[in-house]
């Protein structure tokens, strides 16, 4: 997987993590995903990148600011998915989707906002709704 795609995935995970201020378990999901793809040094490098992307997200937004932030995040998710679409096979997109579902369900349940992001990613990857539902059942 190219550096460009890995960076896009770290950004995607960070955007979704910040959508609901979730638990630190998500970092372990990202780490597990990276371990499947990279050597130890690269895993550390991309975890640092993930944490930088997390810090760069707006923090503590309330009301209208939060709605704007979520709208901007949704657009970012679509842009990232378009980048990913250019380079990954459909099988690889399913793997990304399953890892994303594992990521958002790491705290035990998936919030409405997280589900919207997952649905957006699935739609961007041209994954049919019934196949998305099967992936969700695996989580």
Image (spheres, rainbow, N blue to C red):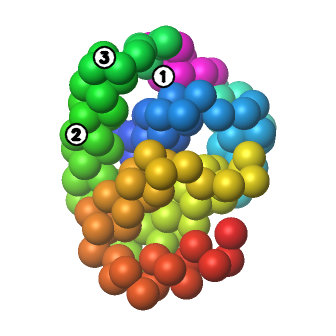
Q: CA distance from mark 2 to mark 1?
A: 16 Å
- 29 horizontally vs 6: left or right: right
Above or below for 122 versus 77: below
Above or below for 42 versus 30: above
Looking at the image, how many numbered discs can be counted on the residues? 3
Q: Nearer the viewer, mark 3 or mark 1?
A: 3
Precedes in sequence: disc 3 or disc 1: 1
Above or below for 50 versus 89: above
Precedes in sequence: disc 2 or disc 1: 1
**Residue 104 visible in this rendered orientation of the protein:** yes
Image coordinates of residue 40 in percent, x first then y, are: 77, 38
Residue segment shown in magenta: 48-56
Q: Which residue is mark 3?
A: 65
Which label sits on residue 75? 2
**Magenta span: chief secondary structure:** helix
Disc 2 is placed on an element classified as helix
Q: Which residue is mark 1?
A: 53
């Amino acid at each position: 997987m190219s550096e460009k795609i890995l960076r896009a995935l770290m950004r995607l995970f960070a955007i979704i993590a910040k959508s609901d201020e979730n638990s630190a378990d998500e970092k372990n999901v990202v780490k597990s995903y990276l371990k499947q793809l990279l050597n130890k040094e690269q895993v550390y490098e991309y975890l640092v990148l993930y944490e930088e992307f997390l810090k760069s997200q707006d923090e503590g937004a309330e009301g209208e600011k939060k709605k704007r932030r979520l709208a901007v995040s949704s657009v970012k998710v679509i842009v990232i998915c378009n980048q990913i679409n250019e380079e990954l096979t459909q099988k690889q997109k399913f793997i990304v989707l399953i890892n994303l579902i594992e990521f958002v369900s790491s705290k035990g349940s998936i919030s409405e906002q997280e589900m919207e992001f997952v649905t957006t990613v699935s739609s961007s990857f041209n994954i049919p709704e019934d196949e998305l539902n099967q992936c969700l059942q695996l989580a």
